[in-house]
Image: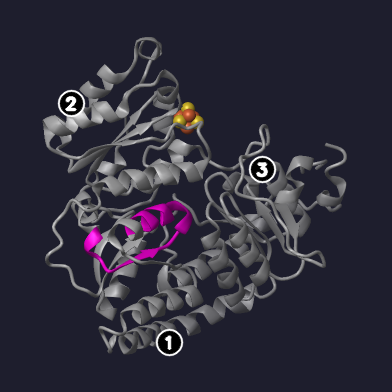
Amino acid sequence: MGSTIFEERDRQIHRKGDEPFSMDCDMPSLAGAVSQRACVFCGSRVVLYPIADALHLVHGPIGCAAYTWDIRGALSSGPELHRLSFSTDLQEKDVIFGGEKKLYQALIELINRHSPKGAFVYSTCIVGIIGDDLGAVCRRVSEETGIPVIPVQSEGFKGNKRAGYNAACKALFELVGTGVIDDISPVSINILGDFNLAGEIWIIREYFERMGVQVVANITGDGRIDDIKRSHGASLNVVQCSGSTIDLAIMMERQYGIPFMRVSYFGVEDMAESLYRVANFFSDGDTDIMDRTRELVRNELAQLYPLLEKYRKDLMGKKAAIYVGGAFKAFSLVKAFRLIGMDVALVGSQTGTEEDYRELYDITDPGTIIVDDSNPLELSSFLQEKDVDIFVGGVKERPIAYKLGVGFCDHNHERKEALEGFVGMLNFAREVHSTVMSPVWRFSPRRISQHSSYELSLKAV
Ligand code: SF4
């Protein structure tokens, strides 16, 4: 493999060594670099998708909707309207004469047919260009049908995935504060930024219930419109995947005075710490909550550690690479790999901030490559250079790993295995073990670079 790193991106890559930490990030992707990031519309779609009793209508060409059809393994304990992705299928005629009439008719028809509790209408690139007034159409349909119909201002071109998260949070905030909150306990939380992939939110809810904490709304996983409407009655917002939902937590704190805390449910350390921090928050009003939490963690670990040990023996010293959407997950994954004896040689994210990368720098070993907003060529080059045994990422990273004869672990939207909680740590170890130790690698040898591609890079681009 020849040169793979663009000069303009050199400052978005840091190799932990003698140099003091310094990195550029949180900026637009380099044109032509084929970033792994998704567009604004996709960012908003992934946050709102798990609201299962809402109608999700993509106002734009069919291609945008096709990309987001049933994109997550976000499960619902009830309605499954979220799994359908509707589109206004804008054509040339609509682009010339406007798509508002078509949008109005589509909304009325779909609401009559599916009786949703609410509707989200997503703006795409072309809608931003032709200037359809989404807000006006949504207001009219809301008045006529009596349900909330909320525009999501997510024109694909107006930023990166982070701007889509912000558009989704603004849309959600329109619902908050419109429901009844009389029966909510003072020891209560909302769960933000968990998408109930493979049923994970049910694992986490059960932990909180054992601690005696009422969950008012799973805002972004197995979500319901009525729960979100009354989520302003909770005493605390517990925010995972903070990149995607922190804006909502900040808006709720400003408007309703609800504090928030950032947590992670991946790996043993972060899972336990998240529960203890929530317990600590409520410990003044509920003096037994800390004892219940300690007992919960003790029982879970007593079951988990002996089971992890057999995987740890085989995996000791093997190498992993991590490239994920948000950096919060990367922190937990670094710790989780350490727990099963593995070294992390590469870690990066699509949307990390300087604070995030500094934390990654602090928790990784010397020699680790830290990368922001990477692309397939760079990632391929790093995987080969570091000769890793497994690559953890999402759907866009999977083919990179397999083409290089490297094992892959899906830690993103499409996964079908629950990886959160103490039981999730066991599932993760089992999956990593079966992938890394698979006999298939004898028949599909790993491709390793002969030289450090980093040394070869830059000048020759
Ligand atoms: S909104 Fe724009 S960038 Fe996003 S999928 Fe549609 S056309 Fe592509």
* Closer-to-camera residue (438/130): 130
Q: Is residue 355 above or below residue 138?
A: below
Residue hosting label 2? 109
Residue 152: image location, x then y, percent: 35, 37
Residue hosting label 3? 376
What colour scheme was applied to this rendering of the protein?
Answer: one colour
How busy is the neighbourhood of tag 3: few (under 14 within 10 Å), some, or many (20 plus)? some
Residue 71 visible at all? no
Q: Is residue 34 left or right of residue 61?
A: right
Cα separation between marks 1 and 3: 41 Å
Magenta residue check for 244 = yes
Q: Secondary structure at mark 2?
A: helix
User: Which label sits on residue 65?
Assistant: none
User: Which label sits on residue 302?
Assistant: 1
- For the point 44% across and 22% down, which residue is it? 126
- For the point 31% across and 84% down, which residue is it? 283
Residue 274: image location, x then y, percent: 42, 74
Residue 69 visible at all? yes
Q: How many marks?
A: 3
How busy is the neighbourhood of tag 2: few (under 14 within 10 Å), some, or many (20 plus)? few
- The segment highlighted magenta reads 232-252
- Determine which quarter of the picture holds residue 336: bottom right
